[in-house]
Image (spheres, rainbow, N blue to C red):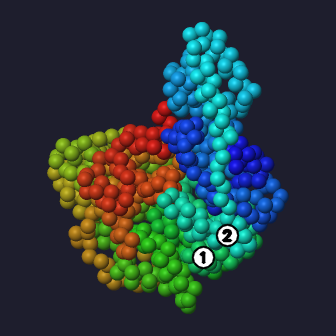
Amino acid sequence: MKISTILDHIDSGHMALPEFQRGYVWNRDQVRGLFDSLYRRHPVGGLLVWATDSSTVAHRGEGRLATGVVKLLLDGQQRITTLYGAVRGRPPKFFEGNVQTFTGLRFHLDSAAFEFYQPVKMRDDPLWIDVTELLQKGTEGLGSFVAQLSSQPERLPKVGDYVGKLSQLLGILDVELHIEEVTGADKSLDVVVDIFNRVNSGGTKLSKGDLALAKICADWPEAREEMKNHLKSWSAAGYTFSLDWLLRSVNTALTGEAKFSFLHEKSAQEVREALAHATKTIDTCLNIISGRLGLDHDRVLFGRYAIPVMVRYLSLRKGTIDATERDKLLFWFAQSGMWGRFSGSTESFIDQDLATIETADNPLDALLEQLRLWHGGLRVEPGHFSGWSLGARFYPALYMLTRMGTACDWGTGLPLKAEMLGKLNRLEVHHIFPKAQLYKHGHARPEVNALANFCFLTKETNLRISDRLPEEYFPEIEASHPGALASQWIPMDRELWKIENYGAFLEARKQLLAAEANRRMTDLLHGEEQWLQGSAPAVSAPPTPLGGIDNEAEEQALVALNDWVTERGLPAGDLGFDFADPQTGAQQAVFDIAWPAGLQERLSGPVAVLINEGAEVIALASRAGYRCFTSVEAFKDYVQKDVLSAGAN
């Protein structure tokens, strides 16, 4: 079939994308390569389509399908989308991706090279031809290009050669692409997806969640968009979740199972009702987590995969629990986060917890017992606060203690409780002993950025303290706001406020933090203190996870990088990514920012940006299959050239 006919079929709704296909991910190098191959009449491969009744399938985008048999692209989406965008000058209706990837393509009449528009280089050179303009005008417009070139005497000797090249470029629309069809009554969605995965074994692979969503969208085409709207709403509130995470919560609410296969037999109406119920219950979970634990934004929401379990529990309880039961459930949530219950084999641990909820006479007690048996004890010990960096697992725990308890700001004396202050954008991480002074005294990075050297203050207070030493500014705080230091678990022995006693200060503060953590956990239990009894795993010398975000400035740089990435239509990375042992959940490292599923999700390998990290961290990430970058600039260059190929702009 001619390329021009294929594009016409897309316009008429006779060819489209199946719902389970992902968005457009090609870069500009690939666009140039495709047009160069077509221009030279090199093979570019055929297409594989699923020929099926338009009334029985879900497709991507808002465009309407034609009545009767339609052809849904299983293999060739990137090529056809590229051709459509460059020829029509606009993306097809099923498009999801970066439009700039195929706009502005130019062809040079002397070199026969394809490049993207560069004003300085191309503006005054008539030999750079706008590919889209030529292909849209066709043979009728060829004359205007020839006339323009013929008006320049120096170009006349080559006009014949130029006409030949322009005609060859126009001839791309007449290139025939072989189309192979998958058809027949036996070709169910399962079979077609299996064929799709086999054909794309070296590229796109559909996950179980993708298949489940494809089945849902077959009966309820608006499902994906409705789910995305909920995700946008949570993102606006400070929580970033994935479509997979939301679908997992819908699954647990509807089936009581973690595996997506249990969704396959559910009707569109059942899924629609489950989504409405799950999103409402998630809102309830976020409200109580934020209001009671103070975990009010994405960076401190450890254990987010505990929420699908909470959704199921609340569903079975029909959403009616009293304050005591609510707090006990929050105790389980916080403990799951502190010990990394869902940082390893997420689905298997969700399954275990869901099975416990379904079968136990007292499901909440059974959940806690299962957590205690898995971890070996739920009591916090001072050694648990031995971590360092803003990505350490107990960093959210420190924030939680600040927001739950009686912590006060050192500049205003005001409480920092969740209901008193609001969002984190009014709080900053403060190094109690300033970094510069600690480095001068020979302390290494893990000591400088130890969790026990962190507290949370308002921005104004943080600026006012600046880089002064505690022995200088602590007395001022105590005089202005008696008790404010102790409220943030500062040892009141003034000898420990001296920098030469920094190590002893950290040890003393870890003792106070552990005591506060157990006190707050006890409050959540409302007298059922047996859950904090028993021996916890030894933590006298816990293994320190590799890597981590050093300070607020580094975190802000990474946040800015994340904004830069999302502005280009790519997914946000996981800040302070918790790299854990898949079986035990033990934290092995903290990657500054990572894309575990790749920047082009499941189409490219995992990526991590590791700033100021040692060789051990980089080696660990590399062994795990991550492509590592040690500077923001190097990462941006990779995104521009390899992912977006926008470097030619």
Residue at the (27%, 45%) spot, across then down: 435
Task: Please give the residue where the numbered disc 2 appears in the rendered image.
Answer: 189
Rendered view: 587 above or below 33: below
**Element assignment for label 2:** helix
Crowd band around label 1 with a 10 angstrom C-alpha radius: few (<14), some (14–19), many (20+): few
Q: Name, please, the residue furthest toward the top.
A: 153
Residue 74's quadrant in the figure? Answer: bottom right
Q: Is residue 311 left or right of residue 630?
A: right
Q: Amino acid at mark 1?
A: Ser
Residue 625's quadrant in the figure? Answer: bottom left
Instruction: Tell which tag, 1 or 2, sits nearer the viewer.
Output: 2
**Element assignment for label 1:** helix
Q: Amino acid at mark 2?
A: Leu
Q: 77 or 312, which lies in front?
A: 77
Rendered view: 444 above or below 205: above
- Residue 253 drawn at (x, y percent): 63, 75
Q: CA gap, disc 1 to disc 2?
A: 13 Å
- Residue 208 drawn at (x, y percent): 56, 69
Q: Name, please, the residue furthest toward the bottom.
A: 361
Q: Looking at the rendered structure, which numbered label has been put on residue 561? A: none
Crowd band around label 2 with a 10 angstrom C-alpha radius: few (<14), some (14–19), many (20+): some
Residue at the (75%, 27%) spot, across then down: 140
Q: Tags 1 and 2 in contact by the CB under 8 Å rule?
A: no
Residue at the (31%, 82%) spot, across then down: 535
- Residue 206 drawn at (x, y percent): 56, 64
Task: Please give the residue where the numbered disc 1 appears in the rendered image.
Answer: 261
